Image (tube, grey):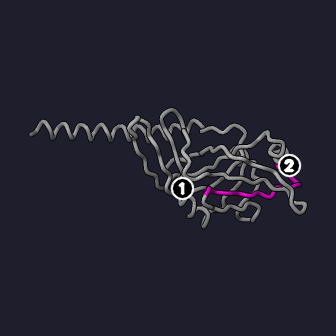
């Protein structure tokens, strides 16, 4: 199973409440198609994250960097909830962490306004559409992190993993065509 990250355009904001600092926004938007690269699309179904929310100690990172942890579910500095729109998160910023404060300031000013999430696909469907494009629908994902990100992109290794999936689909289609031709020729 390959680890993947996914990017979604999202409004991320910074706010102060009762002298605590928070960043919050949607890390995942459900049922919205995202183009991974030319001709390959992905969509997250609403039920995809439910098991992860029950069992995982999900971290909030900056730029998927495990060295920059902004909060986590396990110590209640990250709250995640799934609603009809997507996976919403609220992270309490540690005022004693200069790096977290710098990230907070960049989000507050609007320099950083995107988010992403890291996951292992558990269940997914795909379809090859009539226009030749492929669409993956993530039915279940093992989410281990959410991130505020500067430049949303799929790292090359994750793209390579998706390309392997596409190649397997193409091979499956080719084998199906071969089988049909054999059946036609044997008649």
Please tell me which residue lies in front, 85 or 158.
85
Question: In the image, what residue occupies the spot 42% across and 47% down?
Answer: 126
Residue 101: numbered disc: 2
Q: Residue furthest bottom?
A: 54
* SS at mark 1 in the image: strand
Q: Give the side of residue 6 with respect to residue 127, left or right.
A: right
Q: Is residue 71 magenta?
A: no
How many numbered dots are placed on residues in this image? 2
Query: Dividing the image into 4 quarters, which one contains the C terminus?
Result: top left
Pointer 2 with pointer 1, Cβ within 8 A: no
Q: Give the side of residue 129 with respect to residue 98, left or right.
A: left
Give the image location of residue 63, x and y in percent: 70, 43
Residue bearing the label numbered 1:
141
Q: Give the side of residue 7 with respect to residue 71, left or right.
A: left
Give the image location of residue 173, x and y in percent: 32, 39
Q: Is residue 37 above or below residue 91?
A: above
Q: Which residues are magenta?
A: 85-101
Residue 25: numbered disc: none
């Amino acid at each position: 199973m390959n680890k993947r990250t996914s990017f979604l355009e999202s409004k991320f904001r910074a706010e102060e409440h009762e002298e605590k600092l928070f960043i919050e926004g949607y890390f995942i938007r459900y049922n919205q198609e995202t183009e991974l690269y030319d001709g390959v699309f992905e969509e997250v179904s609403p039920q995809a994250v439910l098991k992860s929310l029950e069992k995982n100690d999900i971290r909030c990172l900056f730029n998927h960097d495990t060295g920059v942890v902004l909060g986590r579910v396990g110590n209640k500095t990250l709250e995640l909830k799934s609603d009809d729109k997507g996976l919403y998160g609220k992270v309490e910023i540690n005022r004693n962490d200069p790096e977290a404060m710098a990230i907070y300031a960049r989000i507050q000013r609007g320099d950083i306004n995107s988010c992403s999430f890291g996951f292992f696909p558990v269940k997914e469907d795909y379809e090859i559409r009539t226009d030749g494009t492929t669409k993956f629908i993530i039915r279940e994902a093992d989410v281990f992190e959410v991130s505020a990100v500067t430049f949303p992109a799929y790292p090359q290794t994750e793209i390579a993993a998706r390309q392997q999936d596409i190649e397997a689909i193409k091979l499956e289609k080719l084998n199906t065509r071969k089988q049909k031709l054999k059946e036609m020729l044997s008649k």
